[in-house]
Amino acid sequence: MPSNTKESHAKYQSIMITKTSSLLNYVDLGQIHPLVISNIIEPLNGIINSDILIKTYRKQALLGGKNVNKYA
């Protein structure tokens, strides 16, 4: 990837994090299937705090997937 493309991507990612971070207070990650979190949300580094992701994974593991599998 050319360096200006990387810089452009980093700038866009920073802007998106800033614009979406206040909306994330309304998202219940516990209702999102763990595969969606790990494959789609988690790779968007910085969008969601890693502590929140760990708490979500822990909660889903303790529930044994009861709530999240109803949508699969």
Image (cartoon, grey):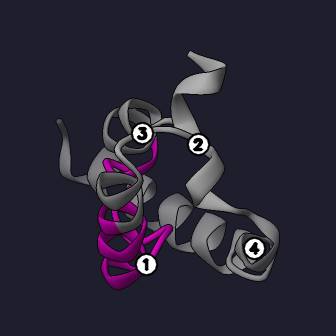
Camera-nearest residue between 9 and 27: 27
Question: Which of label 3 and label 2 is nearer to you?
Answer: 3
Which residue matches tag 4?
19
Q: Is residue 46 magenta?
A: yes
Residue 21, position as x, y percentages in the image: 68, 78
Going from N to C along the chain, the mark reached first, 1 or 3, is 1
Which residue matches tag 2?
32
Local crowd at mark 4 within 10 Å, few (<14), some, or many (≥20)?
Answer: few
- Residue at screen point 50% across, 38% down: 66
Q: Is residue 5 magenta?
A: no
Local crowd at mark 1 within 10 Å, few (<14), some, or many (≥20)?
Answer: few
Which residue matches tag 1?
52
Local crowd at mark 2 within 10 Å, few (<14), some, or many (≥20)?
Answer: some
Which residue matches tag 3?
65
Q: CA distance from mark 1 to mark 3?
A: 17 Å
Going from N to C along the chain, the mark reached first, 1 or 2, is 2
The answer to whether marks 1 and 3 mark residues whose Cβ atoms lie closer than 8 Å is no
Which range is magenta?
41-58
Residue 36, position as x, y percentages in the image: 46, 33
Question: Which of label 4 and label 2 is nearer to you?
Answer: 2
Question: For this view, does 53 lie left or right of residue 26?
Answer: left
- Residue at screen point 33% across, 33% down: 39
The answer to whether marks 4 and 2 mark residues whose Cβ atoms lie closer than 8 Å is no
Q: CA distance from mark 4 to mark 2?
A: 21 Å
